[in-house]
Image: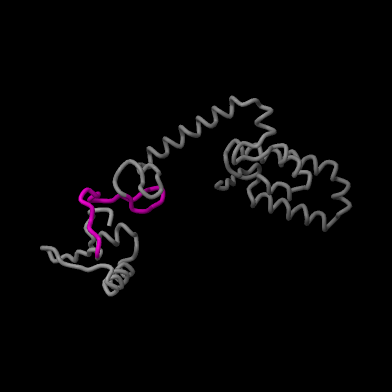
Amino acid sequence: MTTRVPLTRANIVFYTGAQASKADKWLDEMVRDGLVEFDTDDDGELLYKVCGSKRPATGPKELTRCTACKRASGTGSRCSRCGQLLDSHLRALKEEVEGKLVSTALRKLPRAAMLTTSPEGGKNVALGGALGLLGPLGWFYAAPLQEAAMASVAFLLLFSLSKWLVIVLSGLLLPLSAIVGALYAYKYNRTGRRSGLFTDEDEQP
């Protein structure tokens, strides 16, 4: 309804990414319900038309598949669905430039501000350290969930085996846990995502 791409079976299967059998079922159902009708061209190829809809005179004659959202989009520089650049190389270059601009802006901030404040969408480093005093359970604030979960299980297991040992060592363990919690928050603000300190694990923001 918004393009001039021929509504053939082959085009519908290609641009939707659906299996041929499923596309055939959809087309048969729409023909039966009166949503589309079909005719044949000079080569005998079936051409479908949406009933009651006039195709635009200036619509695109072909589509392209967006490498970002994987959906068919009108030709151009940006995807008509998600708005991302259609060229994956240009999109990677844009993200790299934006990342460098953010890093430059962060470096220009006073160091104390970086460590104590929480940028938009970031983590407060002081709060991360304070929550770390609760043990590994406080790491869930900024750490990768798998690392925080594994450390919490280990801590609780140690406590169940010898709670007196944990109490005696709490003067060392809890301050260390607070430092780790603050480091997780600081690394989160540097990378923009939950990043591991003990593994290479990174989680998408």
Name the residue: 74% across, 40% down.
Answer: 129
Magenta highlight: main SS: loop
- Residue 147, percent across and down? 66, 49
- Residue 135, percent across and down? 77, 47
List the single residue furthest toward the bottom.
Answer: 32
Please tell me in which quadrant of the rendered image residue 20 appears.
bottom left
Name the side, left or right, on which 105 lies relative to 156: left
Q: Quadrant of the N terminus?
A: bottom left
Q: Nearer the viewer, residue 93 or 47?
A: 47
Vertical side of 43 occupied by 89: above or below? above
Q: How many marks?
A: 0
Name the residue: 26% across, 53% down.
Answer: 3
Name the side, left or right, on which 12 lies relative to 152: left
Name the residue: 53% across, 32% down.
Answer: 102
Q: Was residue 59 drawn as part of the magenta stretch in this picture?
A: yes
Q: Was residue 163 drawn as part of the magenta stretch in this picture?
A: no
Name the side, left or right, on which 6 lies relative to 185: left
Q: How is the image coloured?
A: one colour
Q: Nearer the viewer, residue 154 or 193?
A: 193
In the image, the segment drawn in magenta is: 52-73
Vertical side of 72 occupied by 83: above or below? above
- Residue 96, percent across and down? 46, 34
Name the residue: 71% across, 38% down.
Answer: 182
List the single residue furthest toward the front.
Answer: 52
- Residue 58, percent across and down? 22, 48
Name the side, left or right, on which 132 lies relative to 4: right
